[in-house]
Image: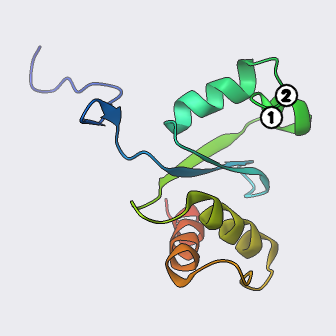
Amino acid sequence: MTDDHQPGVRLRLTDGAFAPASWVYLWRRPSGEVLYIGATGLPPAVRTWLHLSDVDPAIGRVAAEVPEALTGEIEVCGFAVPTGIDRQAVRRGVQALVEGAPRPADIDEDAWATAGDIVTGLSSP
């Protein structure tokens, strides 16, 4: 392989596990409309595949609950959640920010700041 060929995908593992291990991800249209916000311990590509492929509605949640996400162009954006920060709290924070709602009382400062970074990252190229 010559130097100008780079792998299409790089998987980071630490001690036999995917790293990072926490993600918040958003399904959105090119217009910016957010259709779904999730949190997972799986790489976003794997979780996206499960959303599309698994017939169990608890696993294939997007296909079951947001059928409009299965038409047209969709972008799934995944953001790593730093170790020690509750990914579900970050997901709720992102949801609040996307909806223009105030910070929920049960979200600590670190999770809220991470949610803010994610929403800011959505507008970056």
* Left or right for 8, reference 38: left
38, above or below 10, in the image: below
| Residue that label 2 marks | 57
Give the camera-side residue of 54 and 30.
54
- For residue 69, which numbered disc appears in the image? none
| Residue 104: percent from left, percent from top | 74, 80
Give the residue at x 43% y 45%: 21
Q: Examine the image and state in which quarter residue 115 appears.
A: bottom right
Give the camera-side residue of 35 and 96.
96
Give the residue at x 64% y 59%: 88
Give the residue at x 54% y 48%: 78
Q: How many marks?
A: 2
| Residue that label 1 marks | 61
Tell me the amino acid under the disc marked 2: Pro
Disc 2 crowd rating (10 Å Cα; few below 14, some 14-19, many 20+) is: few
Give the residue at x 54% y 63%: 86
Tell me the amino acid under the disc marked 1: Arg
- Where does the N terminus fall, quadrant-wise? top left
